[in-house]
Amino acid sequence: MSARTFQPDRMAGYTLPVYQARTPPEIARGEQALYPVIVVGAGLGGLTAALELGERGVRTVLLDEDDTVGAAGLSSRGICYAKRSLEIFDRFGVAERVRAKGVTWNEGDVYAGLERMYRFNLQPERDQKYPAFVNLQQFYVEQYLVERIMRTPAVDLRWKNRVVDVRPGPDGVEVEVECPDGRYRARCQWLLGADGAHSVVREKLGAKDAESALSEDQWCITDIRMSPSAEVVRKAYVDNPLNAGGAIWYHQMADGIWRTDWQVSQYPDPARETEPGRVTERLKKLLGPDVPFELVWVGPWRFRRRYLERMRHGRVLFLGDAAAQHSPFGARGGNRAIQDANNLAWKLALVLEGKAHEDLIETYDSERGFAARENVEHASRAATFIGPQTHGERLVRNAILDLARADPAMRPLVNVGRLSVATEYADSPLNLERGAPLEAPLAAPGCAAPDGRLGEGYFVDRLQGQFSVAWFGGEAPAPRGAQAIAVPRAGNEALFARYGVPPEGATYVFRPDGHVLARCRGIDPGLAREAIDGVLGYRAGAARRAPPAARAPGRLSPLEADRLYDAFAALLDGSAPEERERTLARLAVLLAGELGDYAKVLAAIDAAADSDRMRAPSGRRE
Ligand SMILES: Cc1cc2nc3c(=O)[nH]c(=O)nc-3n(C[C@H](O)[C@H](O)[C@H](O)COP(=O)(O)OP(=O)(O)OC[C@H]3O[C@@H](n4cnc5c(N)ncnc54)[C@H](O)[C@@H]3O)c2cc1C
């Protein structure tokens, strides 16, 4: 976030809590403990990690240089918390507080210019415990986590404790900490670097990024107080004439505060566009001259795209923004940090208890390293779609918008921010699938457990942070160290369909983070035992247990579709302007040949012609 921000001295209704710094035992009593875990940074990632670890009985010291929640006071950061994060918070009673205070939403409107093209629904299923998203100011979420940690005896949360140096060793790490009472050293078996984008832990370790680049695109957040709307729908505009052809986002959060976000790089002097006068002028155009509002926060921002080469550096593990950064399109940063913590804590707890080999931590590196790269790519591709930089990118983007206007099947190609969902660890070496795959790709090993009603409650309620074995359509004892969940078919048909359960029943094994570990047809206690033993005895470099199942051909994944977008744009940008039509014609002929389906090619030609006719009178740009 840049320095040019505007914020009134006081915001009615807002008082951030101030937490008391206490003298640490190292200074008060000269104690020299070896802590199992020290977490640096009490943001979304560090707080979730400390809570997960503390609730698993791991003695954890959590250090933060500040004495309150939120970054730089009331500054506006994350607002959208995804279903998966809510499921993770649920075990701690935090999700219900977030939902009660925040604004629930599932739907969004997509506009091109001033024309509303369509409304999407991220979660049409009604039988889920949590919605697709709850919007809430980030400082509230952090506050609820802090209050929950205060009731977790295993966590020692130390405010105004700033880590200034990190000294890694083969079996542990020493940190040097500055606090109001002076400087001290603390040692731990594992150090978690959750100290955000400007991570001191990362700097002191010299941990390298695989890539790092600052985006040229410039934006301006403008949070306003305005009457809440009964209809909670996220609005996303591209090419909005009320913003000189730039994009605009807006949606509501708690306390009658709305986040509006404006692309400003298209203006001759983007910095000027963040002045309160200019911001107010634009808002009046968007909302109408008579709609009353009050500015509560204005801040320009650009984003960095980066991720670490490795999430693990010996006994130091990175999570959240310390590990990766990207644009906020898709609401991915905080939700990723929460998932990082959720993935890591159970593995670390098992290793510290001596139940699993230290190599299990390597799977944190591979699974969450993948998640970091995937999130960076999704968020960056959304940025390209929203603010195309080249002629080719704009041409392909507009073609997608034209097609999506007429054909719902094309709408998944519109990328105004692919919103955060649980990462699928399809390539995890822990996964196990025996026999013919069940017909439920969204419940394959590596996926987060699909939810649904189970009796009076919900399926995800039953997982409770431990190894769990669900016997669908049967019953058997759970292996040692796991709980059993018997799911009868009668009354649970929707859940059976979601898990692709065949007539002979099915066995599903879940990891303590709620992801599917293993599955097979029929009731098979042997599979459950093998899957859990495989985790506890996991050794890096051992033969994979289950090669990733080949994906059904014929459907592009969202990332593949977005990568093709780039390839089309590069093709056009690489062609001389007078050659572009011929290039496109060649491409059409080649693709028709590859498709090899006469009726489908004719239908595609018709659809392209319809989109052309539809576009002509509106006279849109490009
Ligand atoms: C405009 C904007 C909109 C966003 N919207 C969303 C959204 O809707 N949804 C979403 O999920 N994400 C969103 N994000 C991203 C989200 O805010 C971040 O990804 C998230 O805060 C990362 O959490 P973290 O715990 O990794 O780091 P941080 O929240 O940055 O926390 C780091 C903590 O470390 C502490 N610290 C730093 N250095 C030290 C040190 N040396 N010693 C001790 N403590 C230290 C800091 O005080 C801080 O508390 C948005 C971000 C921006 C900028």
Image (cartoon, grey):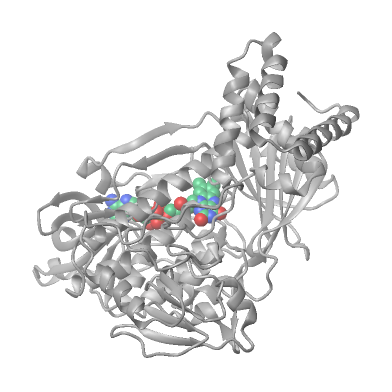
- Within the image, what quadrant is residue 564 found in? top right
Q: Is residue 589 above or below residue 460?
A: above
Q: Is residue 316 above or below residue 615?
A: below
- Within the image, what quadrant is residue 491 found in? bottom right
Q: Nearer the viewer, residue 266 or 420?
A: 420
Which x, y percent locates residue 88? 46, 70
Which x, y percent locates residue 123? 66, 64
- Count of residue discs: 0
| Residue 227 horizontal side relative to residue 202, left or right | right
Asked if residue 408 shows in the view, the reply is yes
Q: Is residue 392 above or below residue 239?
A: above
Which x, y percent locates residue 269? 62, 24
Residue furthest toward the right?
617
- Quarter of the C terminus within the rendering: top right
Which x, y percent locates residue 447? 47, 63
Q: Residue at x 29, y 57 (%)?
A: 544
| Residue 197 horizontal side relative to residue 452, left or right | left
Q: Nearer the viewer, residue 211 or 220?
A: 211
Q: Residue at x 65, y 26 (%)?
A: 590
| Residue 596 horizontal side relative to residue 72, left or right | right
Q: Nearer the viewer, residue 338 or 18?
A: 338
Asked if residue 275 shows in the view, the reply is no
- Within the image, what quadrant is residue 561 found in? top right
Q: Is residue 311 above or below residue 421?
A: above
Q: Nearer the viewer, residue 271 or 18?
A: 271
